[in-house]
Image: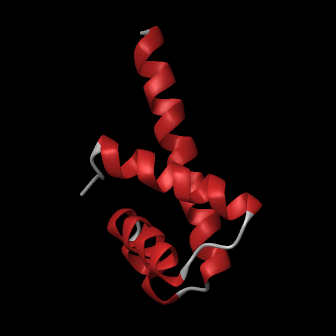
């Protein structure tokens, strides 16, 4: 089930924040929930892998939105 736009935006924010500072445990759990909602196999992976998967998910979403806007 795809994430609603507000959750994708929040995931994008958390990923950006993770690039500059450490996320709180609550933020890490939130990011993991978003990634697992899109990729159920990510439930038991390391947080580093969660961040990588999150970046891929957000990147794919942004690419889709761009392609949709140019069609």
Seen as rendered, the residue at the extreme bottom is 44
Question: Residue 51 location in percent, x, y?
Answer: 61, 67
The percent coordinates of residue 70 (x first, y second) are: 47, 10
Asked whether 22 or 11 is in front, the reply is: 22
User: Quarter holding the C terminus?
Assistant: top left
Report whether 51 appears left or right of 64: right
- What residue appears at the point 63 percent right and 75 percent down from the top-left corner? 49
| Residue 2 vertical placement versus 66 (above, below) | below
Observer-nearest of 56 and 12? 12
Q: Quadrant of the N terminus?
A: bottom left
Count of numbered labels shown in the rendering = 0
What colour scheme does the image use? secondary structure
38 versus 70 height, above or below: below
Tell me which residue sits at (72%, 66%) in the image. 21
Q: Is residue 17 left or right of residue 67?
A: right
Residue lying furthest top: 71
Which residue does the image show at 51% across and 34% down from the upper left?
Answer: 62
Q: Quadrant of residue 52?
A: bottom right
Q: Position of residue 46 (x, y in %)?
A: 61, 86
Seen in the picture, residue 12 relative to 25 is either above or below; the reply is above
Name which residue lies at 37% across and 75% down.
Answer: 40
């Amino acid at each position: 089930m795809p994430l609603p736009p507000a959750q994708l935006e929040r995931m994008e924010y958390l990923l950006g924040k993770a690039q500059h500072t450490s996320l709180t445990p609550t933020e890490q759990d939130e990011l993991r929930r978003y990634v697992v909602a899109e990729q159920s196999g990510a439930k038991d992976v390391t947080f580093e892998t969660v961040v990588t998967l999150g970046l891929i998910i957000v990147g794919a979403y942004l690419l889709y939105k761009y392609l949709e806007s140019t069609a």
